[in-house]
Image (tube, coloured by chain):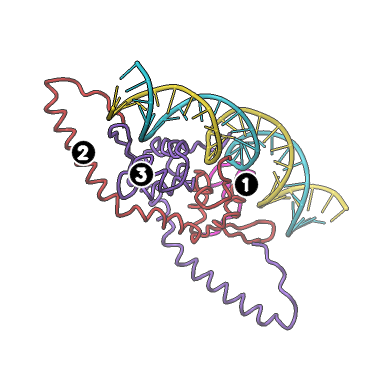
Chain colours: A red, B purple, C yellow, D cyan
DNA sequence: TTGACATATTCCCATATAGGCATATATTTG
DNA sequence: CAAATATATGCCTATATGGGAATATGTCAA
Protein backbone atom coordinates (compact mmCIF):
# COMPACT_ATOMS: atom_id res chain seq x y z
CA UNK A 1 0.00 0.00 0.00
CA UNK A 2 1.16 3.52 -0.62
CA UNK A 3 1.13 6.39 1.80
CA UNK A 4 -2.30 7.64 2.79
CA UNK A 5 -3.70 10.43 0.67
CA UNK A 6 -3.12 13.99 1.77
CA UNK A 7 -6.88 14.35 1.65
CA UNK A 8 -7.50 11.46 4.01
CA UNK A 9 -7.41 13.56 7.16
CA UNK A 10 -6.16 16.75 8.75
CA UNK A 11 -2.91 15.12 9.87
CA UNK A 12 -1.94 14.28 6.33
CA UNK A 13 -3.10 17.58 4.91
CA UNK A 14 -1.08 19.52 7.43
CA UNK A 15 2.12 17.59 6.81
CA UNK A 16 2.84 19.91 3.88
CA UNK A 17 4.61 23.09 5.05
CA UNK A 18 2.95 25.37 2.52
CA UNK A 19 -0.45 24.21 3.58
CA UNK A 20 0.46 25.11 7.13
CA UNK A 21 1.48 28.56 5.97
CA UNK A 22 -1.78 28.96 4.16
CA UNK A 23 -3.75 27.91 7.19
CA UNK A 24 -1.96 30.40 9.40
CA UNK A 25 -2.51 33.16 6.89
CA UNK A 26 -6.21 32.41 6.52
CA UNK A 27 -6.80 32.03 10.22
CA UNK A 28 -7.64 35.64 10.94
CA UNK A 29 -9.71 36.65 7.94
CA UNK A 30 -10.78 35.72 4.44
CA UNK A 31 -8.32 35.93 1.57
CA UNK A 32 -8.85 35.62 -2.15
CA UNK A 33 -6.66 33.16 -4.01
CA UNK A 34 -4.61 35.93 -5.53
CA UNK A 35 -4.04 37.51 -2.16
CA UNK A 36 -2.68 34.21 -0.95
CA UNK A 37 -0.47 33.99 -4.02
CA UNK A 38 0.85 37.49 -3.34
CA UNK A 39 1.49 36.83 0.34
CA UNK A 40 3.14 33.46 0.05
CA UNK A 41 4.89 33.89 -3.28
CA UNK A 42 3.75 30.60 -4.67
CA UNK A 43 2.34 30.23 -8.16
CA UNK A 44 -1.42 30.34 -8.46
CA UNK A 45 -2.08 26.76 -9.59
CA UNK A 46 -0.09 25.51 -6.64
CA UNK A 47 -2.16 27.56 -4.24
CA UNK A 48 -5.37 26.34 -5.83
CA UNK A 49 -4.24 22.77 -5.47
CA UNK A 50 -3.31 23.20 -1.84
CA UNK A 51 -6.64 24.88 -1.18
CA UNK A 52 -8.36 21.95 -2.79
CA UNK A 53 -6.72 19.55 -0.37
CA UNK A 54 -7.53 21.78 2.58
CA UNK A 55 -11.14 22.05 1.47
CA UNK A 56 -11.43 18.29 1.06
CA UNK A 57 -10.45 17.71 4.65
CA UNK A 58 -12.53 20.60 5.92
CA UNK A 59 -9.67 22.81 7.02
CA UNK A 60 -10.83 25.83 5.03
CA UNK A 61 -14.18 27.29 4.13
CA UNK A 62 -14.86 28.92 0.78
CA UNK A 63 -17.26 31.62 -0.27
CA UNK A 64 -17.82 33.08 -3.72
CA UNK A 65 -17.69 36.80 -4.25
CA UNK A 66 -18.09 37.76 -7.89
CA UNK A 67 -15.24 36.29 -9.80
CA UNK A 68 -13.13 35.68 -6.77
CA UNK A 69 -13.37 33.05 -4.11
CA UNK A 70 -12.65 33.88 -0.54
CA UNK A 71 -11.04 31.30 1.68
CA UNK A 72 -10.73 31.19 5.41
CA UNK A 73 -9.30 28.66 7.79
CA UNK A 74 -11.80 26.53 9.62
CA UNK A 75 -9.93 26.44 12.91
CA UNK A 76 -12.28 23.81 14.20
CA UNK A 77 -10.63 21.33 11.87
CA UNK A 78 -7.36 21.79 13.75
CA UNK A 79 -8.83 20.69 17.04
CA UNK A 80 -8.22 16.96 16.53
CA UNK A 81 -4.53 17.67 16.03
CA UNK A 82 -4.45 19.88 19.07
CA UNK A 83 -6.26 17.24 21.09
CA UNK A 84 -3.85 14.55 20.00
CA UNK A 85 -0.74 16.54 20.78
CA UNK A 86 -2.22 17.50 24.14
CA UNK A 87 -2.09 13.87 25.16
CA UNK A 88 1.65 14.31 25.52
CA UNK A 89 1.49 17.57 27.37
CA UNK A 90 1.97 16.04 30.79
CA UNK A 91 4.94 14.03 29.63
CA UNK A 92 7.24 16.67 28.31
CA UNK A 93 7.71 18.15 31.73
CA UNK A 94 9.05 14.84 33.04
CA UNK A 95 11.14 14.28 29.95
CA UNK A 96 12.59 17.72 30.16
CA UNK A 97 13.70 17.11 33.70
CA UNK A 98 15.00 13.71 32.64
CA UNK A 99 16.94 15.30 29.81
CA UNK A 100 18.38 17.87 32.16
CA UNK A 101 19.28 15.13 34.60
CA UNK A 102 20.94 13.19 31.82
CA UNK A 103 22.85 16.23 30.65
CA UNK A 104 24.13 16.84 34.14
CA UNK A 105 25.09 13.21 34.50
CA UNK A 106 26.90 13.31 31.18
CA UNK A 107 28.72 16.47 32.16
CA UNK A 108 29.82 14.84 35.39
CA UNK A 109 30.88 11.68 33.60
CA UNK A 110 32.91 13.45 30.96
CA UNK A 111 34.50 15.60 33.63
CA UNK A 112 35.65 12.57 35.57
CA UNK A 113 36.59 10.70 32.39
CA UNK A 114 38.53 13.60 30.92
CA UNK A 115 41.85 12.42 32.29
CA UNK A 116 41.23 8.79 31.43
CA UNK A 117 39.89 8.38 27.90
CA UNK A 118 37.77 9.87 25.19
CA UNK A 119 34.02 9.29 25.11
CA UNK A 120 33.00 7.10 22.20
CA UNK A 121 30.29 8.51 19.99
CA UNK A 122 27.02 7.39 21.46
CA UNK A 123 24.31 5.68 19.50
CA UNK A 124 21.31 7.94 19.97
CA UNK B 1 8.84 17.04 -6.69
CA UNK B 2 7.25 14.25 -4.71
CA UNK B 3 5.76 14.47 -1.27
CA UNK B 4 8.20 15.27 1.50
CA UNK B 5 9.76 12.29 3.22
CA UNK B 6 8.09 10.97 6.32
CA UNK B 7 11.43 11.46 8.00
CA UNK B 8 11.63 15.12 7.12
CA UNK B 9 9.89 16.36 10.24
CA UNK B 10 7.49 15.46 13.02
CA UNK B 11 4.48 16.62 11.02
CA UNK B 12 5.16 14.14 8.26
CA UNK B 13 6.09 11.34 10.62
CA UNK B 14 2.88 11.75 12.56
CA UNK B 15 0.65 11.72 9.51
CA UNK B 16 0.66 7.93 9.63
CA UNK B 17 -2.03 6.60 11.99
CA UNK B 18 -0.03 3.63 13.21
CA UNK B 19 2.86 5.85 14.15
CA UNK B 20 0.46 7.92 16.21
CA UNK B 21 -0.70 4.78 17.96
CA UNK B 22 2.86 3.80 18.67
CA UNK B 23 3.66 7.21 20.09
CA UNK B 24 0.68 7.10 22.41
CA UNK B 25 1.60 3.63 23.57
CA UNK B 26 5.21 4.56 24.24
CA UNK B 27 4.37 7.80 25.96
CA UNK B 28 4.11 6.43 29.48
CA UNK B 29 6.93 3.94 29.62
CA UNK B 30 9.45 1.96 27.61
CA UNK B 31 8.33 -0.94 25.42
CA UNK B 32 10.33 -3.54 23.58
CA UNK B 33 9.60 -4.04 19.90
CA UNK B 34 7.79 -7.28 20.54
CA UNK B 35 5.64 -5.70 23.19
CA UNK B 36 4.60 -3.09 20.65
CA UNK B 37 3.87 -5.83 18.15
CA UNK B 38 1.71 -7.61 20.70
CA UNK B 39 -0.15 -4.48 21.72
CA UNK B 40 -0.84 -3.06 18.30
CA UNK B 41 -1.19 -6.30 16.34
CA UNK B 42 1.03 -5.22 13.52
CA UNK B 43 3.76 -7.44 12.12
CA UNK B 44 7.21 -6.95 13.50
CA UNK B 45 8.96 -5.60 10.41
CA UNK B 46 6.28 -2.98 10.09
CA UNK B 47 6.76 -1.86 13.65
CA UNK B 48 10.53 -1.73 13.21
CA UNK B 49 10.13 0.43 10.13
CA UNK B 50 7.76 2.81 11.86
CA UNK B 51 10.14 3.03 14.79
CA UNK B 52 12.92 3.84 12.39
CA UNK B 53 10.98 6.80 11.04
CA UNK B 54 10.09 7.99 14.52
CA UNK B 55 13.71 7.72 15.60
CA UNK B 56 14.90 9.64 12.58
CA UNK B 57 12.74 12.60 13.48
CA UNK B 58 13.51 12.34 17.18
CA UNK B 59 10.07 11.30 18.32
CA UNK B 60 11.29 8.22 20.16
CA UNK B 61 14.35 7.35 22.18
CA UNK B 62 15.93 3.94 22.11
CA UNK B 63 17.95 2.03 24.64
CA UNK B 64 19.50 -1.40 24.36
CA UNK B 65 18.87 -4.05 26.95
CA UNK B 66 20.47 -7.34 26.08
CA UNK B 67 18.99 -8.56 22.87
CA UNK B 68 16.00 -6.31 23.06
CA UNK B 69 15.69 -2.64 22.38
CA UNK B 70 13.46 -0.49 24.48
CA UNK B 71 11.68 2.42 22.92
CA UNK B 72 9.95 5.35 24.51
CA UNK B 73 8.24 8.40 23.12
CA UNK B 74 10.20 11.61 23.31
CA UNK B 75 7.25 13.84 24.08
CA UNK B 76 9.41 16.88 23.56
CA UNK B 77 9.33 16.18 19.84
CA UNK B 78 5.58 16.69 19.84
CA UNK B 79 5.83 20.22 21.14
CA UNK B 80 6.26 21.87 17.74
CA UNK B 81 2.99 20.31 16.60
CA UNK B 82 1.27 21.39 19.77
CA UNK B 83 2.65 24.88 19.38
CA UNK B 84 1.47 25.11 15.81
CA UNK B 85 -2.04 23.94 16.55
CA UNK B 86 -2.22 26.30 19.50
CA UNK B 87 -1.98 29.20 17.08
CA UNK B 88 -5.55 28.46 16.15
CA UNK B 89 -6.82 28.04 19.67
CA UNK B 90 -8.26 31.51 19.93
CA UNK B 91 -10.06 31.17 16.64
CA UNK B 92 -12.15 28.10 17.15
CA UNK B 93 -14.33 29.81 19.70
CA UNK B 94 -15.34 32.44 17.17
CA UNK B 95 -15.80 29.89 14.44
CA UNK B 96 -17.89 27.69 16.63
CA UNK B 97 -20.25 30.54 17.38
CA UNK B 98 -20.31 31.38 13.70
CA UNK B 99 -21.15 27.79 12.85
CA UNK B 100 -23.93 27.80 15.43
CA UNK B 101 -25.19 31.06 14.01
CA UNK B 102 -25.15 29.60 10.53
CA UNK B 103 -26.93 26.47 11.67
CA UNK B 104 -29.64 28.55 13.27
CA UNK B 105 -29.94 30.66 10.15
CA UNK B 106 -30.20 27.56 8.02
CA UNK B 107 -32.84 26.10 10.28
CA UNK B 108 -34.83 29.29 10.06
CA UNK B 109 -34.43 29.43 6.29
CA UNK B 110 -35.52 25.88 5.71
CA UNK B 111 -38.45 26.38 8.07
CA UNK B 112 -39.68 29.38 6.11
CA UNK B 113 -38.89 27.74 2.79
CA UNK B 114 -40.56 24.47 3.68
CA UNK B 115 -43.89 25.47 2.15
CA UNK B 116 -42.34 27.06 -0.90
CA UNK B 117 -39.64 24.84 -2.42
CA UNK B 118 -36.94 22.31 -1.69
CA UNK B 119 -33.45 23.45 -0.71
CA UNK B 120 -30.90 22.77 -3.42
CA UNK B 121 -27.87 20.82 -2.36
CA UNK B 122 -25.30 23.32 -1.23
CA UNK B 123 -21.75 23.49 -2.46
CA UNK B 124 -19.47 23.06 0.55
C1' DT C 1 -20.07 39.05 -28.30
C1' DT C 2 -15.38 39.88 -27.07
C1' DG C 3 -11.87 40.51 -23.96
C1' DA C 4 -9.89 40.78 -19.38
C1' DC C 5 -9.57 38.93 -15.01
C1' DA C 6 -9.83 35.05 -11.25
C1' DT C 7 -9.51 30.45 -10.24
C1' DA C 8 -9.39 25.48 -11.21
C1' DT C 9 -7.91 21.49 -13.61
C1' DT C 10 -4.97 18.49 -16.50
C1' DC C 11 -0.74 16.37 -17.92
C1' DC C 12 3.96 14.90 -17.02
C1' DC C 13 7.54 13.20 -13.92
C1' DA C 14 10.75 12.20 -10.14
C1' DT C 15 10.22 10.48 -5.78
C1' DA C 16 8.66 8.22 -1.75
C1' DT C 17 6.05 5.67 0.40
C1' DA C 18 3.48 1.22 3.43
C1' DG C 19 2.64 -3.47 3.36
C1' DG C 20 3.99 -8.34 2.61
C1' DC C 21 7.57 -11.42 2.62
C1' DA C 22 12.22 -13.13 3.00
C1' DT C 23 16.37 -12.57 5.07
C1' DA C 24 20.26 -10.32 7.49
C1' DT C 25 22.24 -8.92 11.88
C1' DA C 26 22.97 -9.02 16.68
C1' DT C 27 22.83 -11.27 21.27
C1' DT C 28 22.13 -14.81 24.53
C1' DT C 29 22.28 -19.57 25.95
C1' DG C 30 23.49 -24.54 25.86
C1' DC D 1 30.07 -23.63 17.69
C1' DA D 2 24.99 -24.13 17.11
C1' DA D 3 20.36 -23.04 18.10
C1' DA D 4 17.10 -19.73 19.60
C1' DT D 5 15.54 -15.20 20.32
C1' DA D 6 14.99 -10.08 19.15
C1' DT D 7 15.23 -6.71 15.87
C1' DA D 8 16.43 -4.57 11.46
C1' DT D 9 16.81 -4.37 6.61
C1' DG D 10 16.10 -5.47 1.62
C1' DC D 11 13.13 -6.20 -2.21
C1' DC D 12 8.83 -5.54 -4.71
C1' DT D 13 4.62 -3.06 -6.16
C1' DA D 14 0.57 -0.11 -6.33
C1' DT D 15 -0.30 4.38 -5.38
C1' DA D 16 -0.02 9.17 -4.53
C1' DT D 17 2.39 13.13 -4.47
C1' DG D 18 4.09 18.41 -5.51
C1' DG D 19 5.96 21.33 -8.86
C1' DG D 20 5.88 23.34 -13.55
C1' DA D 21 3.60 24.52 -17.66
C1' DA D 22 -0.44 24.77 -20.35
C1' DT D 23 -5.07 25.21 -20.52
C1' DA D 24 -9.95 25.00 -19.10
C1' DT D 25 -13.79 27.13 -16.63
C1' DG D 26 -16.23 30.98 -14.77
C1' DT D 27 -17.43 35.79 -14.26
C1' DC D 28 -17.54 40.52 -15.02
C1' DA D 29 -17.30 44.74 -18.16
C1' DA D 30 -17.57 47.36 -22.48
* Image quadrant occupied by the N terminus of chain B: top right
Q: Which subunit holds the residue at mark 2?
A: A
Q: Position of residue A108 (x, y in %)?
A: 14, 33
- Give the tally of numbered discs: 3
SS of the residue under disc 1: helix
- The label on residue A102 is 2
Q: Position of residue A47 (x, y in %)?
A: 60, 46
Q: Is residue A33 above or below residue A65?
A: above
Near-viewer residue (B47 or B55): B47
Give the CA distance from mark 2 to mark 3: 17 Å
Which of pointers 3 and 1 indicates the residue nearer the eye? Answer: 3
Task: Return the residue at label 1.
Answer: A49
Same chain shared by disc 1 and disc 2: yes
- Is there CB contact under 8 Å for labels 2 and 3? no
SS of the residue under disc 3: helix
Which of pointers 1 and 2 indicates the residue nearer the eye? Answer: 2
Q: Which subunit holds the residue at mark 3?
A: B
Label 2: how many Cα within 10 Å (few below 14, some 14–19, many 20+): few
Q: Residue shown at 41%/60% (left/top)?
A: B89
Q: Is residue A10 visible?
A: yes
Give the CA distance from mark 3 to mark 1: 29 Å
Task: Return the residue at label 3.
Answer: B77
Near-viewer residue (C4 or A7): A7
SS of the residue under disc 2: helix
Q: Which subunit holds the residue at mark 1?
A: A
Q: Which residues are magenta?
A: A29-47
Look at the image and say whether residue B16 sits in the magenta stretch.
no
Amino acid sequence: MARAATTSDAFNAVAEPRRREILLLLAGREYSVNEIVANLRVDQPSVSKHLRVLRDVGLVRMRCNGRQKLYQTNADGIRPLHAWTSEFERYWRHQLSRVKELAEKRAADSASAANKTVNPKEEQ
